[in-house]
């Protein structure tokens, strides 16, 4: 199935809001723009395989007669930003004719370039559809500063005035002092392609920021309600159990691993884990034990927030794939090689491409603002007996040998008493029982105390 159809079907099946669809990568429109780039290049005699040869592509499909051991003509497709607007991409095809080798006579170069004689032309479509011819430059390593044709400023700059000019003569008449001839071709349709793509990335940035702000507000509201509900012991334990099931489901990340981008899951995995969380929650019967209406409402808001985040991640995944596909399509049709250069050029300009993972940042906020509001028993358990480590000791040098009541971590003790009252009472009962059994054993032994 064509990707354009797949994209439309995915947006529809995932029930993506219309506002988001309008901000998405417009794959069909960009594809049409690529066709215009291809037509423009072919008009200049720069077919796909021709460009592969000029760009020194390693994989080239050519006829036997088109192959030669080396080529005096080398091309480079350059993407740069204008000084006035960092978001404005300026594409340019630079073709260098190297006359430094004596093996290449004028006749030889004419034979190699006869099918590309118009490639020094810059096409500029005006209202009447006329074509304007711009500039070539000899012995220069820097491109023209402007897209518009300008009068010669030095003897090394030549301006071709019409399509009737003998292109071969212009190519083959470099000054004696120069060994290289550089030609800069600036198309019209590729500029429109990058302008359109840049605008769509800007729209995605705006949408991402807006939705991220909405989710953060949702998290704050839920955190406020959970803080209120935890004051009642019965609700405290139910919410702890609920969050334990949530953490065990590892919906987005493993607990305390949100800082590791490598641990992030795909949107498909997240959806599967979220469904697993709901299934396990229903099996546990926690929801039927909620007595307060506010607890149910808060839980519903918690689930809505998770599905909201999931939908954003699905939308982000779709657009990442659309961007990858359209850049690949551009290279496949033109051989200009922008799959790596374009993302690298704009990597710091768009949140959609350079910002930290949305799942990573939002999940960190969820963990810090909601999950950790109700501490988990595992974080305060003794690694030996696996019960709550009540009356913990702050370790320092010689702490075990000289430990006394001053070494107790009173702050942690109070936290445990507040959030784990049942476990603390059970632990104290166990200690009292253990102490009683020791005293009883000593009393029955008949041994007297010995003063050392």
Image: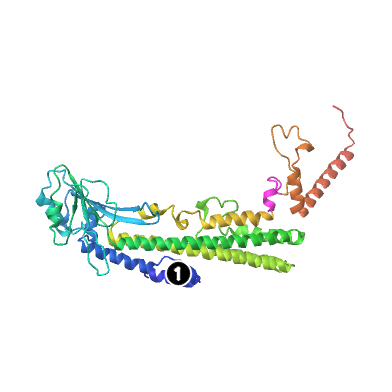
Q: Which residues are magenta?
A: 375-386
Residues 241 and 221: in front is: 221
Identify the residue under disc 1.
22
- The answer to whether residue 337 is seen in the rendering is no
Q: Which quadrant of the figure contains the N terminus? A: bottom left
Is residue 89 among what the camera can see? yes
Magenta span dominant secondary structure: loop
Q: In the figure, residue 293 lies in which quadrant?
A: bottom right
The reply to whether the magenta stretch includes residue 378 is yes
So how many labels did they put on this image? 1
User: Going by the image, does 212 lie left or right of 5?
Assistant: right
**Where does residue 40 sit, x and y in percent of width and height?**
25, 64
Instruction: State the residue at coordinates (20%, 56%).
Output: 120
Q: Position of residue 104 (x, y in %)?
A: 12, 47
Q: At numbered mark 1, what does the secondary structure look like: helix, strand or loop?
A: helix
Q: Position of residue 336 (x, y in %)?
A: 29, 57
Q: Is residue 86 magenta?
A: no
């Amino acid at each position: 199935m064509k990707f354009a159809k797949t994209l439309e079907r995915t947006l529809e099946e995932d029930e993506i809001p219309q506002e988001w669809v309008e901000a998405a990568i417009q794959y069909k429109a960009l594809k049409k723009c690529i066709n215009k780039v291809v037509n423009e290049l072919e008009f200049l005699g720069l077919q796909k395989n021709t460009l592969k040869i000029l760009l020194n592509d390693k994989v080239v499909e050519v006829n036997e007669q088109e192959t030669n051991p080396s080529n005096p003509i080398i091309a480079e497709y350059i993407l740069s930003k204008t000084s006035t607007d960092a978001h404005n991409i300026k594409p340019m095809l630079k073709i260098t004719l190297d006359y430094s080798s004596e093996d290449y006579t004028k006749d030889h170069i004419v034979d190699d370039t006869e099918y590309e004689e118009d490639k020094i032309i810059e096409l500029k479509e005006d209202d009447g559809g006329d074509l304007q011819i711009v500039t070539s430059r000899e012995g220069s390593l820097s491109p023209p500063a402007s897209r518009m044709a300008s009068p010669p400023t030095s003897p090394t700059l030549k301006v071709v005035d019409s399509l009737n000019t003998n292109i071969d003569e212009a190519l083959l008449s470099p000054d004696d002092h120069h060994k290289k001839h550089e030609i800069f071709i600036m198309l019209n349709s590729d500029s429109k392609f990058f302008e359109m793509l840049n605008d769509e990335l800007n729209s995605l940035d705006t949408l991402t920021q807006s939705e991220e702000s909405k989710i953060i507000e949702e998290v704050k509201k839920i955190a406020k309600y959970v803080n209120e509900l935890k004051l009642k012991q019965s609700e405290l334990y139910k919410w702890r159990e609920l969050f334990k099931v949530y953490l065990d489901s590892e919906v987005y990340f493993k607990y305390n691993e949100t800082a590791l981008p490598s641990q992030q899951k795909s949107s498909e995995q997240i959806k599967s884990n979220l469904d697993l969380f709901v299934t396990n929650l229903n099996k546990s019967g926690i929801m039927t034990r909620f007595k307060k209406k506010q607890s149910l409402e808060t839980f519903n808001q918690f689930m809505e927030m998770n599905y909201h985040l999931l939908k954003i991640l699905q939308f982000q995944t779709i657009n990442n794939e659309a961007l990858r596909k359209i850049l690949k399509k551009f290279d496949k049709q033109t051989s200009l090689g922008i799959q790596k250069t374009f993302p690298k050029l704009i990597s710091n300009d768009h949140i959609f491409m350079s910002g930290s993972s949305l799942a990573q940042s939002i999940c960190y906020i969820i963990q810090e603002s909601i999950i950790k509001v109700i501490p988990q028993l595992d974080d305060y358990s003794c690694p030996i007996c696996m019960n709550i480590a009540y009356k913990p000791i702050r370790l320092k040098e010689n702490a075990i040998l000289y430990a006394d009541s001053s070494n107790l971590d009173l702050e942690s003790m109070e936290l445990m008493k507040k959030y784990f009252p049942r476990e603390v009472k059970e632990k104290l009962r166990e200690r009292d029982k253990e102490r009683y059994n020791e005293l009883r054993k000593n009393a029955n032994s008949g041994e007297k105390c010995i003063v050392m």
